[in-house]
Amino acid sequence: MHKAIVGLQWGDEGKGKLVDVLAQKAVYIVRFQGGNNAGHTVVVGDEIFKFHLLPSGILYAGKVCVIGNGVVINPTVFCDELEDLERRVGKDHAQLFISDKAHIIMPWHEALDKLTGKSIGTTGRGIGPAYEDKIGRRGIRVAELVNEQVFRQRVSEELPKRNWHLINEFGAQPIDEQELLDKYLFLAEKLKSHVAQTEYVLGQASPGYQIIFEGAQGTLLDNDFGTYPFVTSSNTTFGNSITGSGVRARDVEVIGVAKAYNTRVGNGPMPTELNDETGELLRKEGNEFGTTTGRPRRCGWLDLVILKYTTMINGVDSLAITKLDVLSCLDELLICTDYRIDNIVISKFPTTVQELERCIPIYKKLPGWKQDIKNAQIFQDLPANARNYIHMIESITDRSVDYISVGEKRDQLIGR
Ligand code: IMP
């Protein structure tokens, strides 16, 4: 079976590491949505690699990485990440293809996101405005970027309208057409050799364990199922791995990744948020600062109302729990099993943020283990209280936890 790796919380679940490890046995590693709002960290030995746009499998020579049609691509970030990687590891990395149908993030998208994204707390990378143009049928695609004549034509059609808005609606600086063309056409030359009809590249995969779909963000940032409007502008859930890449939907196993506690960057409600020293401790021990923007992440207790909901939405077959080692610092642990609104117990995840804001978590208290678990290699190496914590997640979500991450390095991963 192919494997789709999706986030079950608000992103930053540690998907990059799992993708990196599972990529060893796959052939193709595919990103299918989002853009450089994502931040995936892979640690190899003492080297730390942070990717925003390139798939996490890029470090493996002999593999094929695909940035699918569902992704929005900032060409500067693409070229910078690839050049930085090649400076560090040479050409010894995976083969890399970009879909010619993927949409391009243009300078006006970034400008607009910075001007309008504050209330949501976006990453300011132009993701939302680029997807708006895609759905509005006025976006510019990779296939147009790499055809100079077409690209010039498209920019001459779009830029005057965008500048009009920037000037008249926001009092902002207009974008210079010649500068834009010089920059983008230069980048187009650099990325040209990677452009392909990637659905045909992936169409060559045989059934079996060949493809890994690398989700970005998490289910609660999904434009349909997340905490709308405090969400990202793409579908982050399993379904989009198919539409965002053009691979047939059969033969895919879904692995849902969840952190052992909750975190969130940006605005919007989070019922189990801890605005106290325990939250502060989790942030410090877990180094909970956004990979993309450096913003401190909001931290809270693990929320199983969320995991029950997000395992269902994605059709999750099994779970990976990450950063279990971070909880070693606490004497006792709380897990949210249900919510209460006005003394009524709620076990479904509410649709509106207004309802979610009113939810009071109902907790189960578990004893901590207060012991370093970073060297645990098999499940039995974990202290009994840590195993209980995992069993509790399994019994309430009705899914088996097949992977447990106990540190940032590749080998700090327990497979069951
Ligand atoms: P956007 O994706 O930049 O439009 O931001 C929308 C929301 O998604 C904001 O709350 C961001 O903080 C959040 N977000 C976007 N990408 C990520 C990610 O990779 N991890 C965590 N949060 C993210």
Image (cartoon, rainbow, N blue to C red):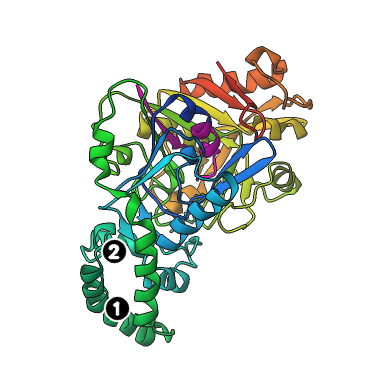
Residue kind at label 2, given as amino acid type: Leu
Q: Nearer the viewer, residue 319 or 29?
A: 29
Q: Is 16 positioned to the left or the right of 219 in the image?
A: right
**Quadrant showing the C terminus:** top right
Q: Is 6 positioned to the left or the right of 336 in the image?
A: left
Return the residue at label 2: 145
| Residue drawn at 42 percent across, 30 percent down | 311
| Residue drawn at 79 percent across, 27 percent down | 370
Pinpoint residue 353: horizontal percent, then vertical percent.
Answer: 44, 52
Residue kind at label 1, given as amino acid type: Leu
Residue farthest front in this picture = 91
Pinpoint residue 274: horizontal percent, then vertical percent.
Answer: 66, 46
Helix, strand, or loop for circle 1? helix
Q: Nearer the viewer, residue 306 or 160?
A: 160
Q: Quick check: can you spot residue 207?
A: yes
Q: Is residue 332 above or below residue 414?
A: below
**Quadrant showing the N terminus:** top left
Q: Quick check: can you spot residue 246?
A: no
Of mark 2 and mark 1, the one earlier in the sequence is 2
Q: Is residue 32 magenta?
A: no
Return the residue at label 1: 159
Q: Which image quarter: residue 130?
A: bottom left
* Magenta-colored span: 1-20
| Residue drawn at 43 percent across, 73 percent down | 111
Give the total number of marks visible in the rendering: 2
User: For the residue carrying disc 2, how many other residues have a C-alpha within 10 Å: few (<14), some (14-19), or many (20+)?
Assistant: many
